Amino acid sequence: MEKIELKNTLPEVFALRDDIYSDVWHRDVTFERGHLYLVEANSGTGKSSLCSYIIGYRNDYQGIICFDGKNIRQHKVKDWVDIRKRSLSILFQELRLFPELTAYENVAIKNNLTGSKKRRQIEEWFGALGIGDKLNAPVGRMSFGQQQRVAMIRALVQPFDFLLADEPVSHLDDANGRIMGEIMMTEARAQGAGVIVTSIGKHMTLDYEKTFSL
């Protein structure tokens, strides 16, 4: 996948509002593979909705979203399975981890499906992010900031053309946020992928090529 295009897209919940001032909604916007974007937003302006629309988890929007010129409303379930396995990865704001499983098991579930990374690489990421001693800890007993790091590692254990990171450092200190950003961008560059980071304030300090305001 080379391009994600939004064409006059708008969440249906905003349809009756006439006070939408946005760089994304009701605009033509293109995200290109290999580039780095920041989407800044206030709470309640549709930031997480945007991610859910792109990943195909929700379709309550007006307008069109296209992958390489094809309207994503035309995709069948089997198409989405392949897209989410090989083209799109996401770190959800709410993380969506399994609390009863260990940190490593949460990552391994996806890695076993994709066969993307060796255990040694995964353990190196855990160590670099300061959670090397949490590999076998149940996620439900970890802090939210620790869980964010686990969720990022999980997002990286697959091939992807685009990575969506929805408020990835909201509960991290600056040092861990910097390390996570470095790991994320190193992997994205290795895959030639595009990265879309969202934020309602605190965000990774990266060399964003374009910033959008919702």
Image (cartoon, rainbow, N blue to C red):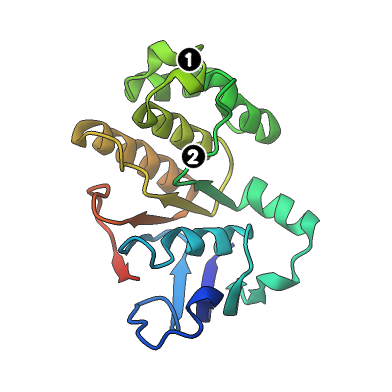
Q: Residue at x 27, y 47 (%)?
A: 204
Badge 2: residue crowd in 10 Å (few <14, some 14–19, many ≥20):
some
Residue type, mark 2 in image: Leu
Q: Is residue 51 above or below residue 15?
A: above
> Label 1 to label 2, Cα distance in Å?
17 Å
Q: Nearer the viewer, residue 140 or 160?
A: 140
Residue 124 in picture, x, y percent from top left: 41, 20
Say which residue appears at 42% left-offset and 21% top-offset.
142
Q: Nearer the viewer, residue 51 or 69?
A: 51
Which disc is residue 135 wearing?
1
| Dot placed on the residue nearer the N-terminal end, 1 or 2 | 2
* Image spot of residue 48 (x, y percent): 46, 58
Could you say which quadrant of the image residue 44 lies in?
bottom left
What is the three-letter code of the residue carrying label 1?
A: Leu
**Residue at 25 percent of width and 51 percent of height:** 206
- Mark 1 lies on a secondary structure that is loop
Task: Tell me if mark 1 has few (under 14), some (14-19) or many (20+) residues whose alpha carbon lies within 10 angstroms of its own.
Answer: some
The label number, if any, that marks residue 45 in the structure image: none
Q: Is residue 43 left or right of residue 86?
A: left
Nearer to us: label 1 or label 2 = 2
Secondary structure beneath dot 2 equals loop
Residue 112 spot, x, y in % from top left: 68, 28
Quadrant (top left/top right/bottom left/bottom right) for the C terminus: bottom left
Residue pointed to by mark 2: 95
Of the 4 image quadrants, the one containing the N terminus is bottom right
- Compared with 127, 77 (above or below) is below
The answer to which of 30 and 193 lies nearer the viewer is 30
The total of numbered circles placed on residues is 2
Residue 184 in the image: state x and y as whole percent.
39, 41
Nearest the eye: 49 or 6: 49
Q: Is residue 147 left or right of residue 6?
A: left
The quarter of the picture where residue 130 lies is top left
